[in-house]
Amino acid sequence: MPVIESTYKPPFWAKTSFVSTVFSGLARKVEGIEQTRERITLPDTDFIDLDWSYAEQKSNKAIILLHGLEGSAQRPYIKGTAKLFNDNGIDAVGVNFRGCSGEPNLLFRSYHSGATEDLDAVIKHVLSKGIYDEIYIKGISLGANMVLKYVGEGNDLPSELKAVIAISTPCDLKGSCDELLSLKNKHYAIRFLEHLKDKLKPKLVQFPNSISVTDLKSIKTLIDFDHVYTSKAHGFKDAFDYYEKASCLQFLPNVKVPSLIINALNDSFLSAECYPVKEAKQNSNLFLEMPKYGGHVGFIGKNNVYYNEKRALDFVNGLL
C-alpha cells in the first residue's frame, strides 16, 4: 500500500525525540485498569506470564500486546492500549516475555526479537479458550519486530488473526543496534545494558556450565551482550547472525495479514533501513505511517490516550 500520511501533532513541549521518549517511558501513568495474571507452560517446559484485562461486556475479540526490550505488561504503553481496547469492547492480554514478569524463567534461554515460537504458543493458548472469533496483535519496539516476523515468515496463521499493529519497529536489528550505540543514545544504551546484565546474573547460579563471571564482565556494550548471551542461548552463531536472521525487514514482502507500522521519523533508535517504504508500496497488506514526531514509543496524545493507541483501535475497526 502507499505510505499513509500521518496526522499526528504532538504537544508543543514534546516535539523532540528525547522529551517524548523519556516522558512516555518514565512519567506516564495509566490508571483504571485491572489486570489478572495467568501462567502458561511453553512446549519446552518454560513459562510465560500473561496479564489479562477485560471489556465490561463479554467479548469475542481480543488483542495480544507485546512489550519492548526489558519491558513488561505493566508498562504504560501496554496498559494504555489495553485500557482503550477494553473501553471499546475488546479483551486484552499483555504478554510478559520469558523472565520479564518479575521472576526468572526456568531455562538458560530467555526472549529475543525473533522468538516467534513463543508468540505462536501464546496465540494458540488464547484461541484454545474457545471464546475469540477475532484476535489482533500489537507489538512495541522489540515486540513489533517479533510480530511482523511472525506474520511474514511462513507460519500457518490462524484465520482468527485479523490485524497487526507494529509501533517504533526496529525492522533492521543491526541498524537499530548501531543507532543505540551512537553517542546521541548513550544514556539509553547504558540503561538497557544495566537491566540486561542484572537479568543475566541469576543465570550464573542456575547455569554455571553455560555462562561465567568472566563472560559477564566481558560485556561492555549491547553487541557484547548479544555475542556472549543472546546468540549462544538461542542458537545463533554470534550477534550479527542473530541480527540478520531475526530482523523482520526481510519478511515484510510475505506479510499476508493487514499490518500497520508506525515509525516516527525522529525516532533516534531507528536507522534508515527501519523505514520500509519500498516494502509497503509493494505489499497491499502493509500500511506504513511515518509521523514527523513521536520519538520512540512517544506519541503523546490528549487525555492520556496516545496517538498510536487510537490508530491501533481505528485499524482493527477497519478505519485508516
Image (tube, helix red, strand yellow):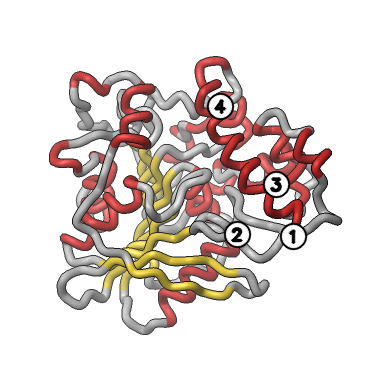
Nearer-the-camera pick, 200 or 149: 200
Q: CA distance from mark 1 to mark 3?
A: 16 Å
Res. 3 visible in picture = no
Q: Say if 115 sits above or below 187 in the image.
A: below
Residue matched to label 3:
230
Spatial CA distance of label 1 from label 4 is 30 Å
- State the image coordinates of residue 240 (x, y, percent, origin top left): 73, 37
For disc 3, the neighbor class at 10 Å (few under 14, some 14 to 19, many from 20) is many
- Residue 115 falls in which quadrant of the image? bottom right
Mark closer to the chain start, 1 or 3: 1
In depth, the one of 291 and 82 nearer the eye is: 82
- Whether residue 255 sits left or right of residue 2 in the image: it is right
Task: Give amino acid for label 4.
Answer: Leu
Circle 3 — which element? helix
Residue 180 - label = 4
Q: Earlier in the sequence, mark 1 or mark 4?
A: 4
**Residue at (61%, 25%) from the top-left corner?**
178
Residue 166 drawn at (x, y percent): 40, 46
- The residue mark sitting in front, 1 or 4, is 1
Q: Amino acid at mark 3?
A: Thr
Secondary element under disc 1, as helix, strand or loop, is helix
- Would you place residue 66 above or below residue 195 in this image? below
Q: Earlier in the sequence, mark 4 or mark 3?
A: 4
Q: Which residue is mark 1?
A: 206
Proximity of marks 2 and 1: CB atoms separated by less than 8 Å: yes
Q: Amino acid at mark 1?
A: Gln
